[in-house]
Amino acid sequence: YPVAHAPGSDGHDTAPRATLEAMAHTSATLLARLRDPADGGAWATLLAVYGPLLRAWGERLGARGADADDLVQDVLAVVVRRFPEFVH
């Protein structure tokens, strides 16, 4: 993804613009692929799209370094665990 950033309401960068655009259009194909726990590529794509956004949100709330990494990991762990219940 390009490295352009979208400014937050306070003028600070919040997440790469391409990440925000990709997030707004999570494909039905990706969502279907995520139903297959063996499809590591689908989960890697999800992480590439949403990981930077989650980290940026965590950093805006004060999480830094390893704490921000832990936050992303904790959120995505819930997504993995609860994804079978997700209906699109």
Image: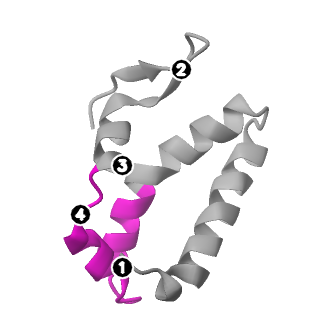
| 32 within the magenta span | yes
Eyeballing the image, is 20 above or below 72? above
Number of residues whose C-alpha sits closer than 10 Å to that of mark 1, classed few (under 14), some (14–19) or many (20 or more): many
Quadrant of the image occupied by residue 19? top left
The reply, left or right, for residue 36 in relation to residue 75 is left
Q: Reading the chain from its start, which is encountered first: label 3 or label 1?
A: 3
Q: In which quarter of the image is residue 35?
A: bottom left
Q: What is the x, y in percent for residue 13?
A: 52, 19
**Which marked residue is nearer to the observer: mark 1 or mark 2?**
2
Dot 3 crowding, Cα within 10 Å, few <14, some 14–19, many 20+: some
Note whether 81 is above or below 47 in the view shown: below
At 73% from the left and 38% from the top, the residue drawn is: 65
Residue 77 lies, in percent from the top left, at 63, 72
Residue type at tag 3:
Met
- Specify the label residue 27 is tagged with: 4
Label 4 residue SS: loop
Dot 2 amino acid type: Gly
Where residue 23 is drawn, which disc sits there?
3
Which amino acid type is shown beneath numbered disc 4? Answer: Ser
Residue range in magenta is: 25-47
Cα separation, mark 4 vs mark 2, equals 25 Å
Decide whether the magenta segment is chiefly helix, strand or loop: helix
Residue 11 horizontal/vertical position (percent): 55, 10
First-in-chain label (2 vs 3): 2
